[in-house]
Image: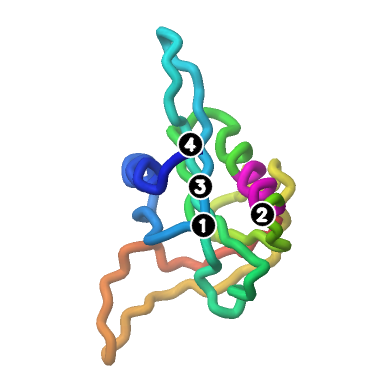
Amino acid sequence: PITFGEACEFIRRHHRHHVPPVGWKFGVAVNAEKEGGTRTVVGVVTVGRPVARAYDNGWTLEVTRVATDGTPHVASMLYGAARRAAWALGYRRLITYTLVSEPGTSLRAAGWREIGHRGGGSWNCPSRPRVDKAPTEQKTLWEA
């Protein structure tokens, strides 16, 4: 287990291209024993309501962030743990997105399947100017 604040701090330090999420339903951490027998967090996953309204049907959750310190196989462990926790809570579908430039190896290893490409682009427009804080490339939708 991990608190929301602890997960957000880990994401701030280790996520490649996103800031922490604004909320969650739950999160999971992976710990590893380091030198001297101390245990430290080496990865976190946050799971919340789907960002896309069309998927927010009460039975679906979305993995909103996965961040690791580079320890091998931790991302796959986190995706698997998120799936098991979502199922245990009664949810029927779990989704997530990756950038199309990311291979999805950890997702495949955890038993997720690729659904297809989605979205991309900037939310900035003349009537509502915005600064892009995340990559604007197309995304790949995955489902557990």
Residue 15 seen anywhere in this rendered image of the structure:
no
> Which numbered marker is on residue 66?
none
Give the foreground label among 1 and 4: 1
Which residue does the numbered mark 3 point to in the structure image? 27
- Name the quarter where the C terminus is drawn: bottom right
Q: CA distance from mark 2 to mark 3?
A: 13 Å
> Residue 94, how many percent across, how many down?
65, 59
Q: CA distance from mark 1 to mark 4?
A: 17 Å
Give the foreground label among 2 and 3: 2
Q: Earlier in the sequence, mark 3 or mark 4?
A: 3
> Residue 48, how many percent across, how many down?
52, 60
Q: Is residue 40 left or right of residue 50?
A: left
> Residue 24, how many percent across, how many down?
47, 57
Query: Which amino acid is tagged 1?
Result: Lys
> Which numbered marker is on residue 89?
2
Query: Which amino acid is tagged 2?
Result: Leu
> Which numbered marker is on residue 25?
1
The magenta stretch is 79-87
Q: Earlier in the sequence, mark 1 or mark 4?
A: 1
Q: CA distance from mark 4 to mark 2?
A: 22 Å
Q: CA distance from mark 3 to mark 1?
A: 7 Å
Which residue does the numbered mark 4 point to in the structure image? 43
What coloring was used for the rendering?
rainbow
